Image (cartoon, helix red, strand yellow):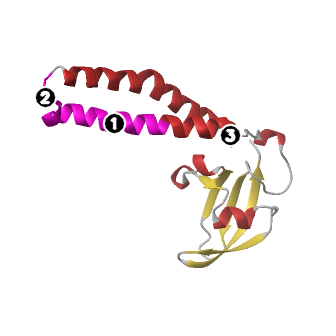
Amino acid sequence: MTREGYESLDAELRDLKSVQRPSIIRAISEAREHGDLSENAEYHAAREKQSFVEGRIRELEDIIGRAEVIDPAKLTGTIKFGATVTIIDEDTEEQHTYKIVGEVEASIERGLLNVKSPLARALIGKDEGDSVEVRTPRGERSYEVVAIDYR
């Protein structure tokens, strides 16, 4: 995982533990004061949220506990995990820039490409000027690697 991904997950975990969890505990306490719990929608909603938050806390603790943080700035050469890659679609001439990241930090909307995705797997080991063929839901696509950066 990249340093940014690690820090993002760590910040989410701290927020869940220090802000969300205490807020839910207060909401449950207030809902209990309203009486009969069997027909108390506020209580049931707060308990459901508590269940979600506790599950997410456990998930994040597990991910962070097993994480290996890689600093892309120390890398060079062909495309590998952590690289920021600029490619051009050889058919449409559209240019895209992606950073190859771990599965839990991937977000195609933010240009963070899952290392296990077909495009990332095709790019790994390639160099500037190389072409790659990728099978996508829209069919076979050809891309040319324009730039590789390790920031």
Q: Which mark is residue 36?
A: 2
Asked whether residue 8 is drawn in magenta, I would say no
Residue to which mark 1 is pinned: 49
Q: Which residue is mark 3?
A: 66
Q: Looking at numbered disc 1 in the image, what kind of residue is underneath it?
A: Lys
Q: Main secondary structure of the magenta part?
A: helix
Mark 2 Cα-neighbour bin, 10 Å: few <14, some 14–19, many ≥20:
few
Q: Residue at x 40, y 25 (%)?
A: 21
Q: Which residues are magenta?
A: 34-56
Direction from residue 1 to residue 58 in the image, left or right = left
Q: Are dots 2 and 1 in contact, CB under 8 Å?
A: no
Is residue 76 left or right of 41 when viewed as pictured?
A: right
Q: Earlier in the sequence, mark 1 or mark 3?
A: 1
Tag 1 near tag 3, CB within 8 Å: no
Q: Nearer the viewer, mark 2 or mark 1?
A: 2
Percent coordinates x, y for residue 64 in the rendering: 63, 36
CA–CA distance in space, label 1 to label 3: 26 Å
Q: Residue furthest right?
A: 77
* 29, 64: nearer the viewer: 29
The answer to whether 145 is drawn above or below residue 19 in the figure is below
Amino acid carrying label 2: it is Asp
Whole-angstrom CA distance, mark 2 to mark 1, is 19 Å
Label 1 neighbour load within 10 Å: few <14, some 14-19, many 20+: some
| Helix, strand or loop status at disc 2 | loop
